[in-house]
Amino acid sequence: MFKLLLLFIIIFILYIFEKYKVLDYLQINIYPKLNYETYKEKIRVNKKNKVIISLTTLPKRIEKCKYTIVSILNQTRKVDQINLYIPTETKKGEKYIIPLWMKDLQKNFNIFNIKIVEKDYGPSTKIIPALIEYEKKDIFIIYLDDDMIYHPDTIETLIFYSNIYSNCAICNSGSRLKKNKYIDILEGFGGVLVKPVFFQNINLEKILEFPDFLYYNDDIFI
């Protein structure tokens, strides 16, 4: 009986490790290797429309966003571009120092782009400059947070459900404010898929006029 129970526990642990990619998570934490050559060989996550990853970071977190970028390169399918949007300086006047590994990644891997933007939209710099750059383009934009290690199926899952619910934004995490079937707030830390057409009648520059309590709460106003 004890041996049977032990076998069950071992199988359960192995299942959890595989389902939630625990070994991948540990590997990224211990040794975040930028396997962009391997990434190039993967199948595109969407054959028809381009898929753009959009994110931003802060001067004090720019080094640590390596873990997030590695987890993007560790996805089951590849995207067409990974854009890191960085303002010339933050709203508080802080400057960015771009790490050497990030410069090398951009130099050797044409999918990864460091994009310097004039305006700081706060946390929403992870999506607003992309919406401006790709205005009216028939593409998918997936915005992510810079302090997360994403499950290898994240991008593929978002695209899968977007192809089913083509007129909806898709998220891995959200919250409801009303008792209906729709999510009212899409939470960026889990990854969010949108299309530029969703924002075509919105003045994105208005964000710069928001009071600080809202300016820094991008999930709510987006």
Image: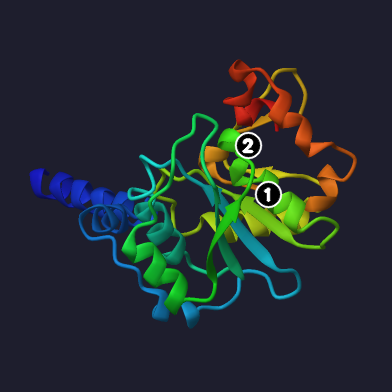
**Figure quadrant of the C terminus:** top right
In the picture, measured across the screen, residue 163 lies left or right of residue 33, that is right
Which residue corresponds to mark 2? 121
Q: Position of residue 144 (x, y in %)?
A: 54, 47
Query: Which residue is painted at 77% across and 24% down in the image?
Result: 180
Residue type, mark 2 in image: Tyr
Mark 1, secondary structure of its residue: helix
Q: Position of residue 50 (x, y in %)?
A: 70, 68
Q: Bin the neighbour count of mark 2 within 10 Å (Cα to Cα): few under 14, some 14-19, many 20 and up.
A: many
Residue type, mark 1 in image: Pro
In the picture, measured across the screen, residue 90 lies left or right of residue 206, that is left
- Determine whether label 1 and label 2 are within 8 Å by CB: yes
In the picture, measured across the screen, residue 122 lies left or right of residue 51, that is left
Query: Which residue is painted at 41% across and 52% down in the image?
Result: 68
Q: Where is residue 216 in the image (x, y as percent from the top left)?
A: 57, 26
Q: Position of residue 136 (x, y in %)?
A: 86, 57
Q: Bin the neighbour count of mark 1 within 10 Å (Cα to Cα): few under 14, some 14-19, many 20 and up.
A: many
The disc placed on residue 106 is: none
Is there any visible trace of residue 179 in the rendered image? yes
Residue 219, located in which quarter of the rendered image?
top right
Query: Which residue is painted at 17% across and 52% down in the image?
Result: 7
Which residue corresponds to mark 1? 129
Is there any visible trace of residue 183 in the rendered image? no
